[in-house]
Image (cartoon, rainbow, N blue to C red):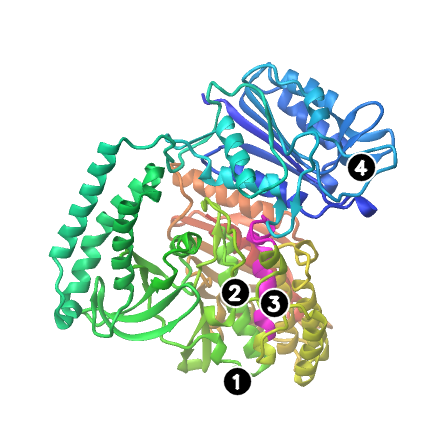
Amino acid sequence: MVARRRAICIGIDEYEGEARLDLCVADATEVADYLRQPEYGFDVELLANQEANLPNIRRALLSVMNEELEFFLLYFSGHGMVTELDAFLVTIDYQPLAEGVSLADLARYTEKISRNTKHCLTILDCCHSGAGQFGQSRQLVTPEEIDRGIPARTESRSLLAACRPEQVAIEDSRYGHGLFTYMLLEGLSGDAADPHGNITVGGLSDFIDRNLEAMGAEQIAVMKGDSAGRVILGQGFSPIAVDNLPEYEKKRIIAQGKQFLEDYTSQLTNHPEDWRNHGHRTASQLLPPTLRWFERQRREHKDLRVDAEFSQLYAAVTNRVKQLAEIDLGTDVEEGVVTRRIGGGGFGTVYEVQRANGERLAYKVYHPTEYGDSEKKSLFSRGYKAMQQLDHPRVIKVKKYTEAPIGFFMEYVDGPNFRDLPNIIEGPVEVLQFLLLTAETIAHAHSRPVIHRDIKPENILAVYRADDNTWIPYLTDFDLAWFDQATQVTKQAWGNISYSAPEQMANPRSAAAHSAQVDTYAFAQLAFYAVTGSDPVPVGRADNSRLLQEKLNSWPVGAAARKFVDWYDRCSQSRPYDRYANFRSAMDELADVEAMIRRANSTTVTPRVALNEIAFALSGFGAAGKIDVSGGAFHSTSGRTSIALTASNVQPSTHGDKFDLEARLSLDRITIEGNASNERKRARINNRIDEVVRSMEGVRRKPGNQGTFETFISISSVECGYAGIQRARLSLSHVIEAIERT
């Protein structure tokens, strides 16, 4: 059995008054995100702001003390303080004579933890320039006090602090972190890896020192403790060689590179017609192995990166890849013939490709002018991987990825993007239904969990359905997406400034910039565009609200218009935690607005109309008008869950009829991963459903026994009106989400 790795990450910004800090929670959150990744494998407890009080920190340390661990790591970013009695890491519940965790106490905790733990590492970034004082007789803690308070006596106990005693640590908003933690994160991302692909404690310290010095920073990180035994913090990264290659080995590699390049060039044709007919396809198949060989050599041998002759060969290879990205119409590529240029964006150009059987595909090719931007190339590849994880019928499906040129084939959708539609979709109900169908695709992505991070009109395609005069949205372009398996956070601010959340632009490396809240913000701006036909002002929330109110004067229901403005204001709050708790909650509130408008002509409806309204909410236009009181079957919007609704026990009431609703929900295929039996997977799904319905009044689950998975949800006394429809819609949509969650 492999011993566990545990980490406690603490970040505090919300000190009172002038003592408030800005970047410490971002520091701790992102360190925690890295430590959770498979390369490190830590179970992380994050304590931020109000959670980082003295009792919680003590509880967390005591819980670690009783475990047998392979590695324990403590990270702290916040204020430090020195009093006449001791040095302290200042907690959020600071009071005079109860300042926080003393370094003497921390030393005792570390001593006891190390009895059952092979390696202990303490990382402290608590000396901030310009930070407020807590009193005239107090000063910020320095590594001198840390050095006295936390002795590191063995190789298994190490301390890494932000600066030397006579210095202060620098907090720079350009990096979104304290400078020490910024360099720490660069190292954790893999840049501090050794020739074996490992990140050691000593190697991480050396990396931080080198880079602080290279930046000219007036601070030097302090490392105390003996890590000569190669204490491995993370592993599985791309190896980075330290020793220079022997001259004969360098010559051998360069000669081999020349031969690869000559072999590739000799098999190509220069005739334009031959190039379009088969040359481009041949080059796309021959070049990737050569490219991968060159990139491996550069990754594994650092001195080759600065060798002029090898660099010239590598540039020649990458130039050939760039040439393949310049595609003429009529060119035969791997999946067919390029018939037209569809459009382009910040990451690539999209072409229409026709296969021999007549099937059309879209081919997105990375911009050849951006090949030198390694982060942007990585994001492009990550967008493809994000789309691979999604199987919603209205999320564009990706197919084959190509290395030369960098690009991928995907499903072709014949329709304009939403930028061209506001003057076509005008009615408030139609606009809201289009937005709700878009929101459902975003919610599906979040359930995987994939955060899109670039919701804007250009990334919503629309297909016109003539039989019911309806535009259906498709979600595409996941170049900025973030998901659990992604191994590197975005370092630069990407996205459209009118649609990107403030935290995404101001602090792109932060965990907040990679959370679902950025999609909530962007979706609200998309809704603004849908209603007004113009882009929102990036920093003018009040101006946006005023324009919304002017446009909404034509809505038939004033209460719905007011509710929409309130919804927009909440979704577009500057601080993520002031928005809705999750995207599903924001989506539910918008559905409430849409339902208010549709019920304007009648406060009560027949049971049949009520059933059809519920079916529309669960399936979109596919089920509209098809459900009778005696029953009707359709599928959820994802197409994965089969739904049958039945109304019974209809009871007249002074406020309209009431009825009991039963929904049969079934799956043809269970998509939960793992080797468990179907019986155990069914039990897992039923447990999820029980968790959801437990808090819902009048809602019960009854087991089914047909097919792969079947269950029945009964809802008693559903009112034939707006409130009853919303109650049933919310109950069943949350149950379906629990069923379809992987």
User: What amino acid does circle 4 point to?
Assistant: Asp
Q: Tell me which numbered mark, 4 or 3, is placed earlier along the sequence.
A: 4
Q: Do the residues labelled 2 and 1 touch (CB within 8 Å)?
A: no
Q: Residue 455 carries which label?
A: 2
Q: Name the mark nearer the viewer: 4 or 3.
A: 4
Q: Tell me which numbered mark, 3 or 1, is placed earlier along the sequence.
A: 1
Circle 3 — which element? helix
Q: Which mark is residue 423?
A: 1
Circle 1 — which element? loop
Seen in the picture, residue 73 relative to 413 is either above or below; the reply is above
Q: Distance between the residues labelled 3 and 2?
A: 9 Å
Q: How far apart are marks 3 and 1 (CA)?
A: 19 Å
Q: Residue 524 carries which label?
A: 3
Question: In this orientation, which residue lies closer to the viewer: 442 or 350?
Answer: 350
Instruction: Using residue 208 as the reference point, say whether residue 411 is left or right of it.
Output: left
Residue 732 shows in the view? no
Circle 2 — which element? loop
- Within 10 Å of disc 2 (Cα), the crowding (few <14, some 14-19, many 20+) is many
Q: Name the mark nearer the viewer: 1 or 4.
A: 4
Q: Residue 461 carries which label?
A: none
Q: Tell me which numbered mark, 2 or 1, is placed earlier along the sequence.
A: 1
Q: Distance between the residues labelled 1 and 4?
A: 55 Å
Q: How far apart are marks 4 and 3 (CA)?
A: 36 Å
Give the residue number, with chain letter if any, for mark 4: 93
Based on the picture, tell me whether residue 584 belongs to the magenta stretch.
Answer: no
In the image, the segment drawn in magenta is 507-528
The residue at the point 42 percent across, 79 percent down is: 464
User: What amino acid does circle 3 point to?
Assistant: Ala
Q: How far apart are marks 2 and 1 (CA)?
A: 20 Å
Residue 243's x, y, as percent? 36, 30
